[in-house]
Amino acid sequence: MALLNTLVLAILATGFLMVSRRSLDAIIRLYALQNILLALVSFALAGGEVHFIVAGLALFAVKGVLIPWYLFWLIDRLEVSHEVEGYLSVSLSLLLAGLLTALAFRVGKAFVLPEAPLPQGVPVALALVLLGILSMVSRKKAISQVLGFLALENGVFLMALSESHGLPLFVELGVALDAFAAVFLAGILIFRIKGEMGHVDTARMRSLRG
Amino acid sequence: MLYLLVFLPLTVFLARRETTLLVQLSVLVPFLGLLLAPFLLGTAAGPFRLDGVGLFYLLLTDLIYGLVALFARGYFPREEAWRFYWAGALFLASAHGAYLAHNLGVLWIFVEGSTLASALLVYHKGGARALEATWKYLMLGSVGIAMGLIGVILVYALVGGVTLDWGEVRSLVGEANPEGLKVAFALLLVGFGTKVGLFPLQAWLPDAHAEAPGPASALLSGTLLNVAFYALLRYTALMQAAGLFPFASGLLLAFGLLSLVFGAWFLFGQREYKRLLAYSSMEHMGLAVFALGLGLPWLALFHTLAHSLSKTLAFLGASGILALSHAKEVGRVGGLVLHTPALGVPFTLSLAALGGLPPFPLFFAEFKAVEVAMKSPWLGVLYLVGLGLAFAGLLYPMAQMGFGQGKPLGGRGLDLWLLWVLLLLLLLLGVLPPVEVFKALEVVLWKP
């Protein structure tokens, strides 16, 4: 239990750091680390059952290796600065992140189901979802929005682990495949945005109104 | 065989970029679907099973896809047609998958798949505006659908983590914790509601519909919105089976009314006719959700059918107008009925159909809904106000584009006869609404 508690807290910490860091490289590394921790949680919960371990490994391969590698490749090819540009200062982001986490822990209890195998994971999962949304709305670069979405998606994954040992294997893999396809598509779009407009700043994309 | 039906649309890729072959395959595939699917009713394979409601939406999607694919032949220049047909094939495969999926997790996967495929449809060949619309759609759609996934997870956990099969879940939800189910349904409504275009989650919808090339807009409005609505339908049926319909009904009625009223309100500010049609989609999906909230799933099914046919007609007409006039604004197009009747008559009548005029089927659907809504007067009155607004909002574009001042349009080889086919179907449906068929479909969903 102590191990699981530590892992869950470490996941929350990576979520916090992803909101506060200003370098895209650091955020991608934190994302990869978060996936390693999530894979460890799913191993710890597996209780020796093979298909949980297979699911954990497959997810780690897609989200811990493939997606971070793709994102690193993307930011190198884009030739834009690796700095996160946001509307909020670091301290304000951290303050908001703290408030959102407190909110997640406050309402998290309503989400915990009686037979949940990892009840302490539920509020953390909610916090990750909220922090992901915070990154998406408070940052300008298209790629940092993708990272916010990925953090959110990890929250959903942790929710599945905490409430019911994760979804059935083939559903879990389908979800991971969808996530990868979404990130891949977003990457192509980001290239086109750069080519078409010369920047990747979503705050300056505002020709469609009303 | 069901697997075959899911992967059938991908055979379009065999044509590579040969436009003629692409068109032939893209029309042949939905035609085969239309022929094949009815014989597969009731069969199951892995996580797939085809029941009446799934079959209904599958046939509707194939019909519309076939018509749109034919129309697109004359619409796109030869060198860019492949973009539409490739993205369309991916979209059709994911729509097939969603309608065949009997597993709630697999349903979610295919709904998300349809989001990604339709993002490619919106993007088409790019440009700053299309990029912005696609990006907005991809981000909002993905976040929304992630909320929906939390709902799926909660439902799975609530039935003890044993199954995600819709039929089995339906027999198990009766014993599930009702408070948990309410939270799950609210998340699912937000998640799939984003894709249905319910207010206030509709921000992506007008941009995507207005910036996508015309035939793609027809697919978005006529088929994509139904995919997410179908998921909502399944989950509402689960709530009903759990005895929680009053709770679900309250939320559905509220979201439906809000989408109706705001969708109708936004109609007034629009200068571009494709944006106008997009807001009309939002309004009509609101009406379908409202009908579901009234506890009339058959009417919701009928409404989506009537809306899909009317809106496909309207968007194909709009793409014809755009291709011939190169004007996006309502005010710069006029007198279509008089000097371009082959295009103007069906388009103007499609606006009348969307405004809910008899003898079109949406009139029948709205009339039936008012009858029931009037049981609680304030609900009925709000509904009527919304309908009135929506009708008034379409009146000026109808008058201006149909009969106002405007230059005659030069011809280009568009297959305008398809518009007349759709118009004929609409009139048939409006004059002889097959209510019994829809009531029979309702039995699949609703527990007595």
Image: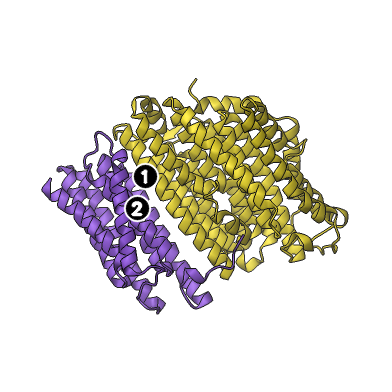
Chain colours: A purple, B yellow
In the depicted structure, whether residue B61 falls above or below residue A13: above
Looking at the image, can residue B1 be seen?
no
Q: Residue at x 54, y 55 (%)?
A: B203
SS for callout 1: helix
Q: Are callouts 2 and 1 both on one chain?
A: no
Q: Decide if residue A174 is on the left or right side of residue B247.
A: left
The Cα–Cα distance between marks 2 and 1, rounded to whole angstroms, is: 10 Å
Question: Where is mark 2, residue-wise?
Answer: A129
- Front in this rendered view, residue B308 or B379: B379
- Front in this rendered view, residue B77 or B268: B268
The circle on residue B240 is none
Badge 1: chain ID: B
Report x, y in % for residue A127. 31, 52
Are there few (<14), some (14-19), or many (20+) residues within 10 Å of tag 2?
many
- In the picture as drawn, the residue positioned furthest to the right comes out as B338
**Amino acid found under the numbered disc labelled 1:** Ile
**Amino acid found under the numbered disc labelled 2:** Val
In the depicted structure, whether residue A157 falls above or below residue B386: below
Question: Where is mark 1, residue-wise?
Answer: B150
Q: Residue at x 28, y 39 (%)?
A: A112
Looking at the image, can residue A89 be seen?
yes
Report x, y in % for residue B418. 73, 49
